Image: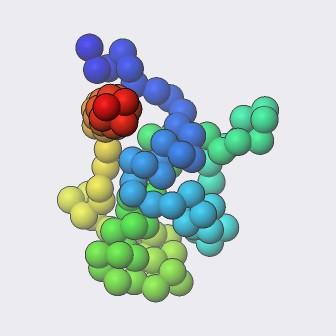
Amino acid sequence: MLESTTKLYYSIKEVSELTSLKPYVLRYWESEFPSLKPSKNKAGNRTYKKNDINVILEIKKLLYDKKFTIKGAIEELKSGHTTKSDSPKMSNKDISVLVEIRNELKSILNELNRH
């Protein structure tokens, strides 16, 4: 059931919510990290794929958890020293579950705001 809700592309707002990062951080990282290059649609809006989200999560882990500098994180990503077990990978199902949870929470919040 969840697989049918899997999306191929995500907006910057959706990625921001899924990764707990502000859109301006995502845009800045895009300018700093060669491995992060989301495509843009005809309107010029960023469209992120599952792989882009995985790269973002890997960058986030290097910068926030492992305390790398941006330069150090770029080198780490280039060298490929991050192991499979270290890399936070999200499957389409994981992303679908997060999107579904987010939508349910929004629905609950809307309901609470009505009362």
> How many numbered marks appear?
0
Residue 35 in view of the camera: no
Q: Position of residue 17 (x, y in %)?
A: 43, 49
Residue 60 in view of the camera: yes
Toward the viewer: 112 or 115?
115
Asked if residue 30 lies left or right of residue 95, the reply is right
Q: Which corner quadrant of the image does residue 42 belong to?
A: top right
**Quadrant containing the N terminus in the rendered view:** top left
Toward the viewer: 109 or 71?
109
Q: Which corner quadrant of the image does residue 56 belong to?
A: bottom left
Q: Position of residue 84 (x, y in %)?
A: 26, 57
Q: Position of residue 48 (x, y in %)?
A: 55, 43
Q: Residue at x 45, y 60 (%)?
A: 21
Q: Residue at x 52, y 37 (%)?
A: 10
Rendered image coloring scheme: rainbow
Q: Residue at x 45, y 77 (%)?
A: 73
Whether 2 is drawn above or below 53: the answer is above
Q: Residue at x 53, y 83 (%)?
A: 71
Asked if residue 8 lies left or right of residue 101, the reply is right
Toward the viewer: 17 or 3?
17
**Which residue is the extreme one toward the front?**
115
Whether 104 is drawn above or below 25: the answer is above
Q: Which corner quadrant of the image does residue 115 belong to?
A: top left
**Which residue is the extreme one toward the left?**
85
